[in-house]
Amino acid sequence: MSLLAAAGRIVDRIKINTITRHVRDGKAVWTKRRRSAALAVVPIANGFFRLAGNPVTILDEVSAWHEWEIASMRALHGGEFSAWSGEQGVLHIDELPGKSISAHLDADTATAAMFAAAAREFRRAHTIECEWFEGGWSHGDPHSGNVIFDATEGRARLLDFEVRHDAALCADARHVDDLLVFLQDTLGRLPQERWVRFASAFVHSYDRPEVTVRLLDRLTTPRGVARIWWAVRTTYLAPREVASRLRALREALAT
Ligand SMILES: Nc1ncnc2c1ncn2[C@@H]1O[C@H](COP(=O)(O)OP(=O)(O)O)[C@@H](O)[C@H]1O
Ligand SMILES: [Mg+2]
């Protein structure tokens, strides 16, 4: 394995936070705190992202990270769920109801309806004006573990706002990138036929042709260092298999 591939693997594996769930006055709240290892890992990860052409930054400074989580919770879930800073760098976040799509993939209970609900939420979130970007908000790291599906309401919600897109990117490019992250993460975790069906439901439910037309261009494995990040993001599925699935999705979307 090359040194860069090893770096990609490390960046993906090392947990930078400690997360715990508490129930206070009958209300569930999650607390999140940076582990001391994050101090060393975050700059390495950000350096790797620059090399791999991944247009995001992990917010390194605790105050900047908290600010972005709180602002994003307010923008996306304001009035319903919020986040606030506690003592010693702890962030508290109201519990979002449901279970992550990643957990559903692991339990083999994921459905096309969940993928469609995720896409509707991506679309809604992307149309929220964001001061920082001076344009539509974007997530930066919306893999399926950061998408919580609420079966009661049949809707999805996003969480985990500590990675931010580079502001130099235009809104459409950031939005395409978000769609791609979700597709990359799910690509290797379902049988091909089912993934293509669920992924098509995802793209159709997102329903912004001006964005999805750009997505088609990105549904191919890149060359160079960016390829290593693709391997990480597609859970090390054999490159030939990745290419075959992307081709199948492009064909499904073209019809
Ligand atoms: N507010 C919350 N509501 C529901 N689940 C949560 C909440 N916060 C964290 N979790 C659970 O913990 C997992 C990890 O939290 P996350 O904020 O994504 O941290 P990390 O940066 O480590 O990925 C999530 O995938 C989710 O399952
Ligand atoms: Mg997460």
Image (tube, grey):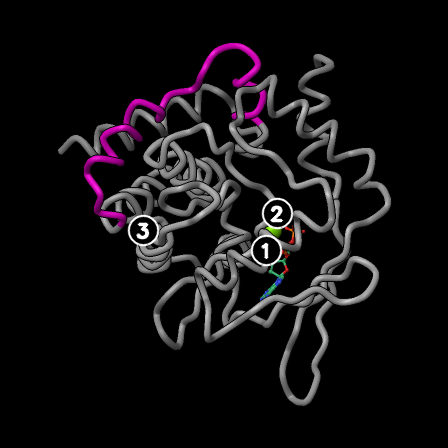
Q: Quadrant of the N terminus?
A: top right
> Which comes sooner in the sequence, label 2 or label 1?
1
What SS does tag 2 mark?
Answer: loop
The residue identified by callout 3 is 127
Q: Position of residue 174 (x, y in %)?
A: 40, 35
The residue identified by callout 1 is 69
What SS does tag 1 mark?
Answer: helix
Q: Are marks 2 and 1 in contact (CB under 8 Å)?
A: yes
Q: Quadrant of the C terminus?
A: top left
Rendered image quadrant of residue 87: bottom right
Rendered image quadrant of residue 222: top left
Q: Position of residue 96 (x, y in %)?
A: 53, 69
Q: Position of residue 75 (x, y in %)?
A: 45, 60
The residue identified by callout 2 is 162
Q: Amino acid at mark 1?
A: Glu
Rendered image quadrant of residue 50: top right
Packing grade of label 3 (10 A; few <14, some 14-19, many >=20) is some
Residue 12 placement, left or right of 89: left
For the residue pair 113 and 49, the one nearer the viewer reads as: 49
What SS does tag 3 mark?
Answer: loop
Packing grade of label 2 (10 A; few <14, some 14-19, many >=20) is many
> Which comes sooner in the sequence, label 2 or label 3?
3
